[in-house]
Amino acid sequence: MSPTKRLYNIDFLRFMFAIMIMYYHVVGVLNNFHNTSFLQNLAVKGGLIGPNIVYAFFILSGFFLYITNISKPEKLSDFILQKVIRLWPLMAISFVPFIFLGTYNKYLDTLNIFFISAGTGIVKGGSNNPATWFICVLFFTSIFFYCLIKQNSRQKIINICAFFSFFCFIILTYSPNGKGYGAIALPSLRLTVGMIEALGGMSLGILCAIIYSSFSLDNEKTWLGKKILISVTEIFIFLYFIKSVAWHNPKFSEEIYYQLLFIILLFLFLQNKGFFSQLFNHKIFGVLGSFSYAIYVMHFPCIAVLRKYILETNLIKNDVHLLLLFTTFCIVVGGGAAICIERPITNYLKGKLQKNKQSKK
């Protein structure tokens, strides 16, 4: 697959996963306040959404890290700067609502802005925006895997990533310290569950990228019968994965099963041979996919605002209405933040970076 080729159906997966993560947290917050059988049922049945969708995001991150950087002549300093430009502005802005709400933590929240969180194992205690743990961990592990890709042969990359994938799965399966991202999964190395998930997930993603780049069938013609068969497979895997993760009693020992399901789904969407994957390969889903990071980063500030002015004032009592309000508000604010804040700031910073590079030549 060419690094310049963009598949909008992968953007669709990103958008859908961001919505699922948001839903997972919204239901948890509402259940803590109302604790009705309806919300309890949603919270229990959706207990697998958090860990499995986060792992899927790490797999996607590793996949595209390899695909876009394997042949790119970029210095490590440039890569880090690009990562900061991509991740930092919106993450920093996500803490502004907490300042107005009077809940900003001068220690933990400030450290999060500089990619230091409980997920990295550097500090203890959570942040007002727990979603930032993923960004902090992703930042450091992306740098690690970038160096790995640039400084080793393909065979060494395969060996190292295969080791990390297996090692991290074993640690996560048998860790006695819980499943929270800040929990220490490997005490001897002080590695947290969040770091283990990132190392294992990105390793799997890189392995998938190597396999895909070696055996891609992009130029092969697909006859109608085969296309129908692929389409049925795509629909079945997609619906089964979503149903299993979003409506299943949590059994964390089965995590590798759902990761393999997602990898199959990813390969099917990357091949884009069936009617189902092609249905989502439209620019509109590219637009929605561009909102996914903003929705993920901003949904906790949105929850905090609604919690103060809706839940704590008991303004709306109906559980269904609350669920619809919270999810709609998070999506709208996330999309608005992507268009009005994230995109202009990142484009401006990238433009400044490009001008600086040209002036040095």
Image: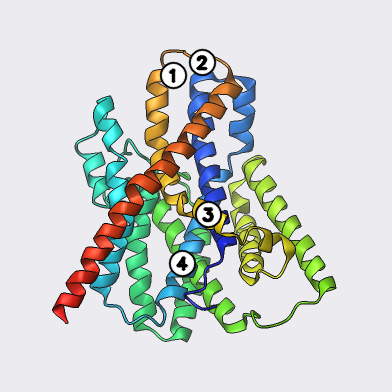
In the image, residue 19 sits, relative to residue 37, either above or below, namely below
Residue topped by disc 2: 316
Sequence-earlier tag: 4 or 1: 4
Estimate how packed mark 3 is, as few (under 14), some (14 to 19) or many (20 or more) residues with alpha carbons within 10 Å. Answer: many
Estimate how packed mark 2 is, as few (under 14), some (14 to 19) or many (20 or more) residues with alpha carbons within 10 Å. Answer: few
Residue drawn where x is 65% and y is 39% of the image: 249
Question: Between 284 and 318, which is closer to the camera in this rendering?
Answer: 284
Q: Which colour scheme appears in the figure?
A: rainbow
Residue 299 in percent (x, y) is at 43, 38
Image quadrant holding the C terminus, namely bottom left
Mark in front: 3 vs 4 = 3
Q: Kindly state the secondary structure of the residue where label 1 is placed.
A: helix
Estimate how packed mark 4 is, as few (under 14), some (14 to 19) or many (20 or more) residues with alpha carbons within 10 Å. Answer: many
Residue topped by disc 4: 62
In the image, residue 318 sits, relative to residue 163, either above or below, namely above
Q: CA distance from mark 3 to mark 2?
A: 31 Å
Sequence-earlier tag: 2 or 4: 4
Left or right placement of residue 68 versus residue 51 in this view: left
Q: CA distance from mark 1 to mark 3?
A: 29 Å
What type is the residue that disc 1 sits on?
Answer: Ile
Residue drawn where x is 63% and y is 43% of the image: 246
Q: Kindly state the secondary structure of the residue where label 3 is placed.
A: helix
Image quadrant holding the N terminus, namely bottom right
Q: State which quadrant residue 353 falls in.
A: bottom left
Question: Between 232 and 120, which is closer to the camera in this rendering?
Answer: 232
Q: CA distance from mark 3 to mark 4?
A: 14 Å
Sequence-earlier tag: 3 or 2: 3
Mark in front: 4 vs 1 = 1
Residue topped by disc 3: 14
Residue topped by disc 1: 310
